[in-house]
Image (cartoon, rainbow, N blue to C red):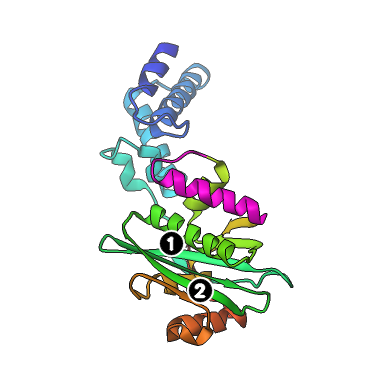
């Protein structure tokens, strides 16, 4: 019996313990045991067709009760039981997220990148504890992937801070992948590895915290990265910035949140 279970299990492309090919033999054995007891103690005749119907009905009810999901049928998309699965309704609900000012006396750097038709650009800005602009920048990177562009935009912002003798205590980007890469110390492929090494060195030199921020709360950097100003631009005055970027900075300084839509399963 053990060999039957093992061979049945390894016919599946999934090794998950809740896969249908793991659950099915257990259910079959349960109903076989039940039929055996009914025959022995109640005198009811053992019927194979009856056992099969009971197994099918039980699994169908599991599906209708929402206990079985499509992930449990990975590699078995043609299984008849899939028809009985109750799909949980999903809805999008709004969630308020806002950029937070750094503590008194500290500076915060935010950066972001944009890739459009294979052309990458990045932008970012440094602000004080009142949300006021210290400087902002925009730079084009040519043909780059998103992660590379995100890392290059971050490096550009950190280098500008270093060149100006400014020390950001908090640094935020809306790329979780970049935050994880920088924090893990993993050596990435070339030339990304060189960019990450420089980023880590600068962050360490600043003793800065490096964290993820939702894109909806990083709108000022997001808009800077997409202005398409051409080449490299550094803005030292608030009024030099495009109107949309200025508006976003003002909203951030006033604590006005952005709306993030999240999926909620009912």
Please, what secondary structure does the residue beneath circle 2 have? strand
The answer to whether residue 203 is left or right of residue 139 is right
Q: Which label's residue is closer to the chain start, 2 or 1?
A: 1
The answer to whether residue 142 is left or right of residue 157 is left
Query: Residue 81: x, y in percent?
Result: 33, 41
Nearer to us in this view, 13 or 174: 174
Q: Dot 1 surroundings within 10 Å: few (below 14), some, or many (20 or more)?
A: few
Q: Is residue 93 above or below residue 208?
A: below
Nearer to us in this view, 65 or 170: 170
For the point 40% across and 21% down, which residue is it?
45
Range of residues picked out in magenta:
186-207
Rounded to the nearest angstrom, the CA distance separating label 2 from label 1 is: 40 Å
Q: Is residue 44 above or below residue 180?
A: above
Q: Dot 2 surroundings within 10 Å: few (below 14), some, or many (20 or more)?
A: many
Query: Residue 238: x, y in percent?
Result: 53, 84
Query: Residue 193: x, y in percent?
Result: 45, 43
Please, what secondary structure does the residue beneath circle 1 have? strand
């Amino acid at each position: 019996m053990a060999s039957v279970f093992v061979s049945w299990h390894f016919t599946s492309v999934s090794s998950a313990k809740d896969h249908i090919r793991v659950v099915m033999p257990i259910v079959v054995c349960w109903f076989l045991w039940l039929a055996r007891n009914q025959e022995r103690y109640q005198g009811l005749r053992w019927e194979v067709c009856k056992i099969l119907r009971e197994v099918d009905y039980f699994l169908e009810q599991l599906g209708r009760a929402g206990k079985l999901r499509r992930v449990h049928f990975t590699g078995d998309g043609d299984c008849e039981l899939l028809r009985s699965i109750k799909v949980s309704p999903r809805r999008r609900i709004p969630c308020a997220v806002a950029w937070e000012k750094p503590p008194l006396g500290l500076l915060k750097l935010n950066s972001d990148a944009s890739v459009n038709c294979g052309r990458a650009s990045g932008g970012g800005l440094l602000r004080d504890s009142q949300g006021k602009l210290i400087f902002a920048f925009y730079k084009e990177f040519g043909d780059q992937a998103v992660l590379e562009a995100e890392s290059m935009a971050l490096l550009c912002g950190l280098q500008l801070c270093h060149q100006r003798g400014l020390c950001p205590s908090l640094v935020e980007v809306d790329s979780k992948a970049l935050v994880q890469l920088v924090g893990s110390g993993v050596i990435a492929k070339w030339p990304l590895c060189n960019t990450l090494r420089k980023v880590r060195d600068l962050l360490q030199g600043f003793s800065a915290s490096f964290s993820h921020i939702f894109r909806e709360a990083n709108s000022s950097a997001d808009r800077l990265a997409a202005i398409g100003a051409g080449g490299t631009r550094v803005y030292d005055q608030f009024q030099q910035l495009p109107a949309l970027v200025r508006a976003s900075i003002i909203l951030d300084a006033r604590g006005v949140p952005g709306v993030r839509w999240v999926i909620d399963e009912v």
